[in-house]
Amino acid sequence: MALDFVAGCLGGVAGVLVGHPFDTVKVRLQVQNSNQPRYRGTVHCFRSIIRQESIFGLYKGIGSPMMGLTFINAIVFGVQGNTMRYLGKDTPLNQFLAGAAAGGIQCVICCPMELAKTRMQLQGMGEYQVKSKVYKNSLDCLIRIYKKQGICGINKGMVTTIFREIPAFGFYFLTYDCLTRALHCEPDDSYIIPKLLFAGGMSGIASWISTYPIDVIKSRMQADGVGGINQYSGIMDCIRQSYQKEGWQVFTKGLTSTLLRAFPVNAATFATVTLFLMYTRADDDCKELETASASAIQQHSSL
């Protein structure tokens, strides 16, 4: 049981290091002013950030996901693994239900973490009146928000986060389960690593596609109020205004960078988790066999 949590931590670290630059681009594209867009697309956004803010600009706000995803992945893989044991049968439906349960529970950490990440990533964007460095780091960001707005402030966007995470993680684990079954991923398979990387990457893509429009609204809700300007009175108002101003395309803003990020991040995450569990459990099984054999020999010699 504890191994699920440890594996999740390791997978989270691997995923953040690989994918945070893509996430920064995604957020910038999602929340930029539609009337005077600063970036023409994913590639232009990447180049602009590197040119204006150096390579470190792509890693703005990484402290929040690096701290948060350690716990989030521990929760997700821990809850998912334990829920599967509780449900009993390893079926696609149970994989979806276990993933959905894990997605819902981890929102408690995910929402404040993503709020801090979003606010940090927006520093330097003129249209949000945060040209100067308002926050020192992710923790400082959350502390400042808490002092001004209390517990509700640091949980801004919680409803949209829940609506996104529950189905997203359901499809996440369902897709991975189906693909690893179809690819016949076995410990003694010489191609197991590329198979796990492919299954993990495709699981991430399926997960994001299933709930991406909700993520756009979540980002806009969490960015709302930066610089003292509030545009939306609630979720439905955000959806209505966004659609009226930018059409249905608004709900796919940043999708390209998200999918580019989703494959390597989730490939690294799932492969790390699966291989860790596979080999640690194999070692445990070997130790159990050795203990049982030693016990049997002792009993035999005492006869």
Image (cartoon, rainbow, N blue to C red):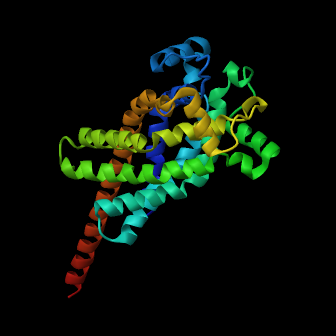
Q: Is 8 above or below relative to 127?
A: below
In the rendered image, the residue lying farthest to the front is: 244
In the rendered image, the residue lying farthest to the top is: 51
Q: Position of residue 156 (x, y in %)?
A: 67, 46
Residue located at (29% from left, 59% from top)? 92
Q: Quadrant of the N terminus?
A: bottom left
Q: Position of residue 57 (x, y in %)?
A: 59, 22
Q: Quadrant of the C terminus?
A: bottom left
Q: Is residue 184 found left or right of 218 in the rendered image?
A: left
Q: Is residue 89 visible?
A: yes
Q: Is residue 56 found left or right of 213 in the rendered image?
A: right
In this view of the protein, which residue sits in the foreground, 125 or 72? 125
Q: Position of residue 35 (x, y in %)?
A: 61, 19
Q: Position of residue 302 (x, y in %)?
A: 23, 85
Q: Is 217 above or below relative to 56?
A: below
Q: Is 212 above or below relative to 41?
A: below
Residue located at (52% from left, 40% from top)? 215
In this view of the protein, which residue sits in the foreground, 58 or 32? 32
Q: Is 96 above or below relative to 132?
A: below
